[in-house]
Amino acid sequence: MSPFEVGRDIVSAVKTSDHVQQLQAHGVALADAADRAGLDAAVPTCPDWQVRDLLGHIGRVHRWATSFVGTGRTQPPTGDDEMAETPDDDELLGWFRRGHESLVRTLTETKPDVECWAFLPAPSPLAFWARRQAHETAIHRLDAESATGTVTSFAPEFAVDGIDELLLGFFSRPRGRLVSDPPVSLGLRTTDSDVAEAWTIAIGSGSREVTRGVARGDCIVSGPASELYRLLWNRRDVDDIDVAGDRALLDLWRDKAKVSWS
């Protein structure tokens, strides 16, 4: 079944053009942070990476996304697909910038009714890719900034949209490692007055179920939207965030909540 035949009640309320603007801004900030930190700098939020690894990864992902939107490819990737080759250090930052600019341009210029492969619910393939790449780039912008020692927070509305994508998109799919026997439930609540939102994710022995609008469960986590967004992407600990109930659920999340593209 196509992802455009399900989940229409959980798609983003943010416009595709706004996602493209976010993608553009976070990509520029990512490159600037990488330039300040230097390619050899360690990335604290991705302990196995240096900045060159981060640039190589997101540069390949940007070109990968562009290849689907730009060519109208409707078939999913296969094991034979090859991602772009990462250049040498002296060309790496410029290579990243060019790939990012190409993705932004492709998403801006492509017709809204383009047909191409995608893997999460969305009103259209173009809307999917704009949203996915905005959040992919935003999280990796945070990674690049972590190498400089100073991380910028996310706008609350954008963070809420990212939490929606993560929970109602990635973790509402039937497969994945995030399971628990016996079943447990995790509640999340934003404390920003202008974006008061809540979610409950029930984690069973073989799947997950997400309910939006209420925070209940064995563990309830409350905090600013930006910090919950970072926490759910395993980019921060729970310091300065309110946790009520069984904190072991957060260990389960850190260990099992791994995102894959397909």
Image (cartoon, rainbow, N blue to C red):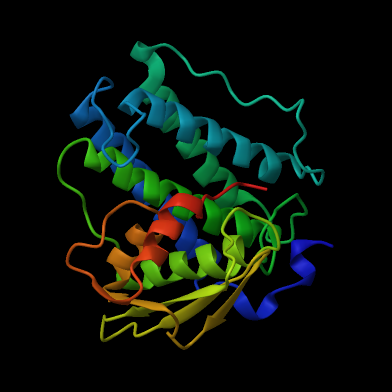
In the image, what residue occupies the spot 50% across and 70% down? 164
Disc count in the image? 0
In the rendered image, residue 131, in percent from the top left (x then y), is placed at 53, 59
| Residue nearest the viewer, comparing 206 with 49 | 206
Q: Residue at x 62, y 36 (%)?
A: 64
x and y, in percent, of residue 71 in the image: 74, 39
Quadrant assignment, res 56: top left
Query: x%, y% of residue 204?
Result: 62, 70
Quadrant of image for the N terminus: bottom right
**Residue 231 visible within the image:** yes
| Direction from residue 75 to residue 219 in the image, left or right | left
Give the x, y percent position of residue 154: 29, 62
Q: Is residue 13 visible?
A: no
Residue 133 lies, with reference to residue 180, above or below; the image says above
Determine whether 172 is above or below 84 in the image. Answer: below
Q: Nearer the viewer, residue 174 or 6?
A: 174
Looking at this rendering, what residue extends furthest in the front direction? 182
253 w.r.t. 77: above or below: below
Q: Say left or right for 157 vs 200.
A: left
Depicted 116 relative to depicted 199: above or below: above
Judging depth in this view, the residue of 48 and 130 nearest the camera is 48
For this orientation, the residue located farthest to the right is: 1
Residue for point 44% across, 24% down: 95
Residue at the spot 20% in from the left edge and 29% down from the top edge: 37
Q: Nearer the viewer, residue 127 or 161?
A: 161
